[in-house]
Image (cartoon, helix red, strand yellow):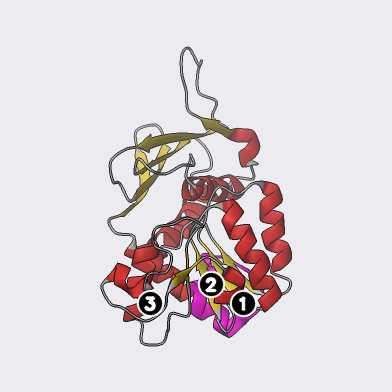
Amino acid sequence: MGRVLLESVAQAPDMRLGAALERSGSPFLGKDAGELSGAPCGVLIGEDAAAALKGCHALIDFTRPEATLDHLRICRELGVNIVIGTTGFTPEQKTLIADAAHDIGVVFAPNMSVGVNLCLKLLDMAARVLDEGYDIEVIEAHHRHKVDAPSGTALRMGEVVAGALGRDLSECAVYGREGVTGERSPSTIGFATVRGGDIVGDHTVLFAGTGERIEITHKASSRATFALGALRAARFLAQRGKGLYDMQDVLGLR
């Protein structure tokens, strides 16, 4: 994602790269960030977020929860907006993100893709229509290196469907099945996870009824879709300022 974000910023006429951050010990530290995308830009990759972010307007963060929360703290201190594409947060960590949004602009979404977020809107509509007689399954597939499961996008899809049906996902979700499980409960929302190869990200929500199946699917073929959505979110924050937003807000789908 870092490389794709660098490429996307370089191609955006209204944006300029102010800093690039890596974890301590990374072999990329000290290198020109633009070299990773094929266009040297004079911005050296560093690990000191507080020093790097001075004078910046927004940080786009696709890392891990612990690193993101550290960056969030620094952004809050410096008054820098943040776009968070990281997944795998605990409920307590999500509370910290919401609290920071009292002082800075935060776009927090499990998936920055415009197409995925349109699917979330469609899922809300579908669930309200298919509220009886349809079993619901969320199937997702990602590359072998992804560390959290189900994906944040899959969980968000489940949350949207559960909310439309008046259910609590924490009470009705079923994560995988094995052995003699018994008959499927109609009130559950199932999740199936695939990990392998270099799959960028596939998500399908299946509504299985009697005599028909409705599937809402999104397949990402390039990480560029996430990067372009993240840039769109940064532009949104430049106009809106402090507050907690998601991609539904950015795209005007509320």
Q: Secondary structure at mark 3?
A: helix
Q: Residues within 10 Å of mark 3 (few under 14, many from 20)?
A: some
- The one nearer the camera, 86 or 233, is 86
Nearer the N terminus, badge 2 or badge 3?
3
Q: Secondary structure at mark 1?
A: loop
User: Is the C-beta separation of discs 1 and 2 under 8 Å?
Assistant: yes
- Residue 183 visible to the viewer: yes
- Against 131, residue 75 (above or below) is below
Nearer the N terminus, badge 3 or badge 1?
3
Q: How many marks?
A: 3
Furthest residue in direction bottom, as rendered: 14
Q: Secondary structure at mark 2?
A: strand
- The one nearer the camera, 202 or 224, is 224
Q: Is residue 241 magenta?
A: yes
Q: Is residue 178 magenta?
A: no
- Against 45, residue 117 (above or below) is above
- The one nearer the camera, 3 or 180, is 3
Which quadrant is home to the C terminus?
bottom right
Amino acid at circle 1: Val
Q: How far apart are the two marked residues, 1 and 2, measured between alpha carbons?
A: 7 Å
Region of the chain picked out in magenta, as a range: 233-254
Residue at the image point whose x is 28% and y is 77% from the top = 39
Residue 80 tag number: 1
Residue at the image point whose x is 36% and y is 73% from the top = 32
Q: Residues within 10 Å of mark 2 (few under 14, many from 20)?
A: many
- Against 191, residue 12 (above or below) is below
Q: Which residue is mark 2?
A: 59
Q: Which residue is mark 3?
A: 9
Amino acid at circle 3: Val
Amino acid at circle 2: Leu
Q: How far apart are the two marked residues, 3 and 1, measured between alpha carbons?
A: 17 Å
